[in-house]
């Protein structure tokens, strides 16, 4: 039987999730929920489903039949409004696929993960960059040992984004993706050190942007890999959205522009392996990474896999949030933050 699903939050992202569920054979889209009722109504009328002005109204109406939700609310730093609807849905025993960041409050993120564990339900985060075919192939190469012993990871993600709602908007709103990709290949982080700066802005305070719009973050992973993240809200996305390079004793791979191309450089040979996404029958545009992620979510929930096997889980979302908060603490305290000591 298809999984009965609703979407909470009817902005651009919610209106991306909904139509994917609508057409997916493993899902039945039941309706849309938004605290701005006209937004939920518009989405529901388009897809021929129900609509509600609150999570409680949704639960009272279809709580007995509903099985899962996508939480696509927004809020400060793009994650400020996730906590309340997520906790309401988890408490009701629903499986939750949350948008990133899991929350812009690490304390709230911890509570959400703990609630999902308490209720025994599935909790995933839309960390969709890891679900591209080239990323999956790179992970397969690592498992096969083609890189030898992993040593270094360099990650770059930048976008020309004028938006800012707080000093930490850039690091909190954008880099759950970057840091999740790094963790996908390198495992858990142990130590974090970060540096930030503001880009010039004519009408900003002191002639600068409100948010720390450029970041350099150093990470020591538990397995000994040394990682580095370069992030910016001040560059031209058309050049390259995202680039990840992982080097080991026997070679290195470069995953270019997030979903377009994967290249393996063996250490002792000039014979490169180049794989383009189109060759792998992959996506034609970044927006379709949502299809890949939601498809995997539906597959795993429908198959009732063990909770610890959920890919891009709530625990993964919390782990990247812990790195982000450690980066903020590093900058503010002019120090290296030891995550193992904090945990």
Image (cartoon, rainbow, N blue to C red):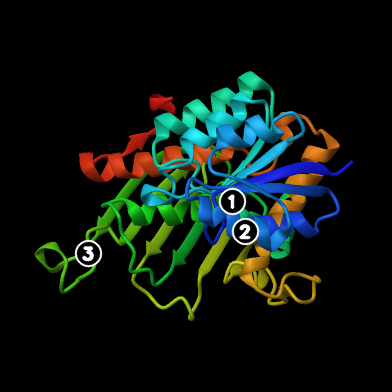
Which is more toward the observer, 338 or 303?
Answer: 303
Give the quadrant of the C terminus.
Answer: top left
x and y percent of residue 65 in the render?
A: 77, 33
Cα–Cα span, label 3 and label 1: 27 Å
Q: Earlier in the sequence, mark 1 or mark 2?
A: 2
Task: Quadrant for residue 47, please give it.
Answer: bottom right
Residue wearing tag 2: 43
Q: Earlier in the sequence, mark 3 or mark 1?
A: 1
x and y percent of residue 167 in the render?
A: 26, 52
Residue 209: numbered disc: 3
Task: Quadrant for residue 197, please give it.
Answer: bottom left
Tell me: 110 left or right of 142.
left
Residue wearing tag 1: 127
Disc 3: CA contacts within 10 A as few (<14), some (14-19) or many (>=20): many
Picture residue at 25% right of the left edge, 40% below the top: 335
Which is more toward the observer, 334 or 60?
Answer: 60
Give the quadrant of the N terminus.
Answer: top right
Picture residue at 68% right of the left edge, 31% below the top: 94
Cα–Cα span, label 2 and label 3: 35 Å
* Disc 1, SS: loop
Residue 6: numbered disc: none
x and y percent of residue 60 in the render?
A: 64, 30
Tell me: 189 left or right of 196.
right
Picture residue at 55% right of the left edge, 63% below the top: 244
Q: Earlier in the sequence, mark 2 or mark 3?
A: 2
Tell me: 212 left or right of 316.
left
């Amino acid at each position: 039987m298809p999984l009965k699903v609703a979407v909470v939050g009817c902005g651009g992202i919610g209106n991306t999730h909904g139509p994917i569920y609508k057409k997916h054979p493993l899902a039945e889209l039941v309706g849309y929920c938004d605290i701005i009722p006209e937004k939920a109504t518009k989405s529901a009328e388009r897809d021929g489903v129900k609509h509600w002005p609150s999570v409680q109204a949704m639960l009272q109406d279809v709580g007995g039949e509903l099985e899962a939700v996508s939480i696509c609310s927004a809020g400060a730093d793009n994650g400020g409004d996730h906590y309340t609807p997520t906790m309401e849905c988890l408490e009701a025993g629903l499986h939750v696929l949350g948008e990133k960041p899991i929350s812009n409050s690490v304390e709230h993120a911890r509570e959400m993960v703990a609630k999902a564990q308490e209720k025994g339900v599935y909790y995933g985060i839309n960390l969709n960059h890891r679900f591209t075919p080239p990323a999956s192939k790179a992970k397969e190469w690592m498992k096969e040992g083609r890189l030898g012993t992993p040593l270094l990871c360099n990650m770059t993600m930048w976008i020309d984004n004028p938006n800012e709602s707080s000093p930490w908007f850039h690091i909190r709103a954008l880099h759950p993706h970057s840091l999740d990709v790094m963790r996908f290949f390198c495992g858990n982080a142990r130590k974090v050190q970060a540096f930030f700066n503001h880009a010039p802005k004519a009408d900003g305070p002191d002639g600068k942007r409100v948010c720390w719009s450029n970041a350099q973050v150093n990470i020591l992973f538990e397995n000994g890999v040394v990682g580095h993240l370069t992030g910016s809200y001040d560059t031209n996305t058309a050049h390259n959205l995202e680039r990840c390079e992982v080097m080991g004793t026997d070679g290195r791979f470069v995953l270019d522009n997030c979903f377009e191309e994967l290249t393996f450089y063996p250490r002792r040979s000039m014979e490169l392996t180049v794989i383009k996404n189109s060759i792998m029958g992959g996506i034609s545009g970044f927006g379709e990474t949502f299809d890949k992620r939601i498809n995997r979510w539906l597959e795993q929930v429908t198959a009732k896999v063990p909770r610890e096997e959920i890919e891009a889980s709530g625990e993964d979302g919390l782990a990247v949030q812990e790195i982000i908060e450690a980066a903020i603490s590093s900058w503010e305290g002019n120090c290296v933050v030891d995550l193992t000591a904090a945990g």
